[in-house]
Amino acid sequence: MLPEGRVEVRLADHPPVTVPAVASARWDLRLVTPLQLPTPDALFNSPATGLELRLRDGGLTGRATAFKGGDRDGLLGPYLPHPCELRRVA
């Protein structure tokens, strides 16, 4: 977590990225990164990752979604949710 509503995210062997994050009534942390989940379904055609997490028992759990943004006609690409648990790395 960084000041001004930003977080640094590292995923698999990608270098870390810093992105804006928000909270909502449903999620304690929501963000989108340009990182790709390293799962067979996401590697096919889903180059971005979203995180939607809730704070529970001292940890963040929820889902990571792999997706491709919409085109100019409003059509969405694949949307692939995956269970997610965020762990602190020392």
Image (cartoon, helix red, strand yellow):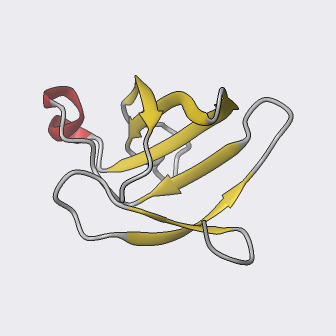
Q: Residue at x 74, y 77 (%)?
A: 4
Residue, far front: 90
Is 44 on the left-hand or right-hand side of 46?
left
**Quadrant in the rendering for residue 78:** top left
Give x and y (percent) for residue 9: 43, 61
Indicate the quadrant containing the C terminus: top left, top right, bottom left or bottom right: bottom left
Give x and y (percent) for residue 6: 63, 70
**Quadrant in the rendering for residue 15:** bottom left
Q: Name the residue nearer the viewer: 66 or 88.
A: 88
Q: Residue at x 18, y 32 (%)?
A: 39
Indicate the quadrant containing the N terminus: top left, top right, bottom left or bottom right: bottom right
Whether residue 70 is situated above or below residue 53 in the rendered picture: below
Whether residue 37 is situated above or below residue 19 in the rendered picture: above
Residue, far bottom: 3
Q: Name the residue nearer the viewer: 38 or 69.
A: 38
Is 46 on the left-hand or right-hand side of 25?
left
Q: Residue at x 43, y 42 (%)?
A: 87
Give x and y (percent) for residue 3: 70, 77
